[in-house]
Image: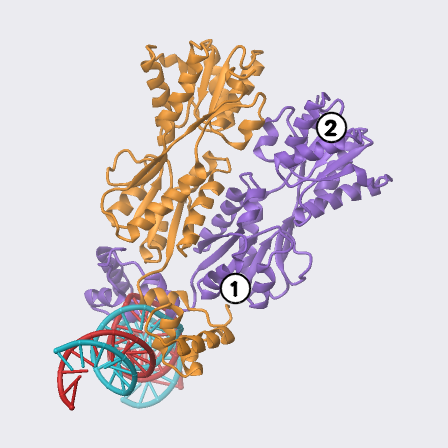
Chain colours: A orange, B purple, C red, D cyan
Amino acid sequence: MTPSNTPTLEQIAKAAGVSRSTVSRVINDEPNVSDAVRERVWRVVKEMGYHPHAAARSLAGRRTKTLGIVIPQAVNTVFSDPYFSRVLHGIADAANEQQYHMFLAMVPPHQEDDFYRRSLRSQMLEGVVIISAFLDDALIPRLHRDDIPFVVIGRHPTIPEVNYVDVDNLHGALMAVEHLMRLGRRRIATITGPMNMVAGVDRLEGWKAALRRNGHVVDETLIAEGDFTEAGGYLAMQQLLQQKPDAVFAANDLMAIGALRAIYEAELRVPADIAVVGFDDAQVAAYSTPPLTTVRQPIYKLGRTAAELLFRILEGRTQAPLRAILPTELVIRASCGSVM
Amino acid sequence: MTPSNTPTLEQIAKAAGVSRSTVSRVINDEPNVSDAVRERVWRVVKEMGYHPHAAARSLAGRRTKTLGIVIPQAVNTVFSDPYFSRVLHGIADAANEQQYHMFLAMVPPHQEDDFYRRSLRSQMLEGVVIISAFLDDALIPRLHRDDIPFVVIGRHPTIPEVNYVDVDNLHGALMAVEHLMRLGRRRIATITGPMNMVAGVDRLEGWKAALRRNGHVVDETLIAEGDFTEAGGYLAMQQLLQQKPDAVFAANDLMAIGALRAIYEAELRVPADIAVVGFDDAQVAAYSTPPLTTVRQPIYKLGRTAAELLFRILEGRTQAPLRAILPTELVIRASCGSVM
DNA sequence: AAAATGTCTGGGAGCGCTCCCAGTATAGCA
DNA sequence: TGCTATACTGGGAGCGCTCCCAGACATTTT
């Protein structure tokens, strides 16, 4: 399939009048080759269009210079933002800097097992970045058991040795809710994410923490579970409207936009009657009516940092579980009522 | 790094009391192995936790069972929709069905060359899917020259032998514009995409075709070039407002949303004063105010079809340039004025 | 002066598989 | 009964590299 006229090391060696070993040294930039030889070899390499054969390399040496990226496909449908592109972008930039290749696995539900054997155990990957916020992901305990180096994007609450990168969901949510309090809101409801995702759980915790810290009681009737989709936010808001809240914190922007829709249909105004705050600072947030106050998370950085941690693990420069928590930032627009 | 206690074929063979060849036959589901032996080997394979070594396999055989996905990073920033996730999703599903692995390359601008050598020529990839709508992509002529099988997502106008998948941009745009005409609009402007992307060019052609087919003259002052971003759409619309159009066709939804913003700032109403139609049916389209009439394109299918074409090429079942044009569909919402 | 160090080069061994060919046993047919 | 077709099984060769060790030579040290 691929051009079979690709020359091998041996052929280059012959053409340059040196040995296989010397050519290998040259193309790998190793020392102990005279300048004259080095130059001659490079010339022949260019002329003959030599490209090292990846499989041969990783069979002989042990390095594949490849990292895996695992995305459970179910997650994909939940984050229907440019979330993935941006995370991948971050990983890609880090990988490129280290001359690493990226192997992408979008794992269909209930096929983790098959996939695991085919891809992860084939020694094709030096390490893995998992984009997953599912709490019950089966892959994580497995990778951990099999000693395959990996970093998860999204905190892992149950296995303490897991290396992960996450944003400070709790603090971000807390900031958002306290902002609403400062603006005089009293009955602050929340639309949560799915409870099998850390992001969902942690943002709810942030909402609760804000209430407690400010002497409010946590009123369970002001909590409605959503699923990170617009439709879910809409339904959750309809339910919450019966509790007559004067503000709502949605665990992501898409649900906040669904909430806006429900509020308008009930003929209430935002922010006059109900203030709305989202999470993510997705593109839509800036263009909704009114523009959404939201908690921005550094998605690109999340990907980049995950890859960087993985490289540190691969270089063996560290033993301890590695983790990074990136900061979030409150972006104030019109929907919370502080800008009219 | 990866568990080095992974057994090899030879070790399995010894443990099962058979030869290397027999084990190879068993794990590859080849015929000519007695049921008793087959079963015994499988048992030992499971017990010892054998997993074939990918690099060894592809060095010995010639198949890597891996396809590459190339995304010029610049494109990524232009399509800031879930576009990529969905395309990847489509490719992933097709790849999974064929037990193929996916190799992801997000190529930074001006690094095509380096990347090309490292990844594409290393015989790691059996074929490549290119997600690229840039007309001047340097990779395409190169792959073509080097005889590496590939399929491009997005029509390629200059090299006739290129295999590609695209949506019917021209017809989609034409439908949208004719829809506006049927609603009585007379001065229909357009905000184009970048002119170095086929999607941009073809959608503009569709707008022109609709005008011509219906006896209008093509008024160049009703054309403003955008860049597929919200901000670009906003600026283009501001410019177009001076021509007093009664409708505008934007080459994607994000620009349409930017146009809405410009129109509101000029204190005009949509659709009463100006009707707006977008392209893509991105998620935002349904939630803008008013909801956007738009041309839906089957993004998931685009990815899936590209992979399927590639597999057909790899199987050698075809010689001729392979291409597929997928249909678009007009989604009517409020912004065009036919639903009030 | 000989010995010790350092620089450069070549070739053997082997990574873990697949492919091919040569066997051996069993069945099928004259 | 022989002889050929057929089902299995084993082992050599080799994919294109990297790693390691040994040798040739130049340079420094005692």
Q: Quadrant location of residue A53? A: bottom left
> Are the residues under marks 1 and 2 on the same chain?
yes
Please indicate, yes or no, whether residue A236 appears anywhere in the rendered image.
yes
Q: Answer above or below: position of B273 versus B15.
A: above
The circle on residue B275 is: 2
Dot 2: chain letter:
B
Q: Amino acid at mark 2?
A: Ala
For the point 72% across and 20% down, the residue is B267
The circle on residue A126 is: none
User: Residue A86: image x %, image y %?
Assistant: 48, 41
For the point 33% across and 70% down, the residue is A31
Dividing the image into 4 quarters, which one contains the C terminus of chain A? top right
- Is B269 displayed left or right of B70 in the figure? right
Residue nearer the viewer, A214 or A261:
A214
* Dot 2 crowding, Cα within 10 Å, few <14, some 14–19, many 20+: many
Q: Secondary structure at mark 1?
A: loop
User: Residue B214: image x %, image y %?
Assistant: 84, 39
Residue nearer the viewer, B80 or B285:
B80
Query: Of callouts 1 and 2, which one flags the residue occurring earlier in the amino acid sequence?
Result: 2
Rounded to the nearest angstrom, the CA distance separating label 1 from label 2 is 49 Å
Q: Are marks 1 and 2 in contact (CB under 8 Å)?
A: no
Q: Which residue is mark 1?
A: B315
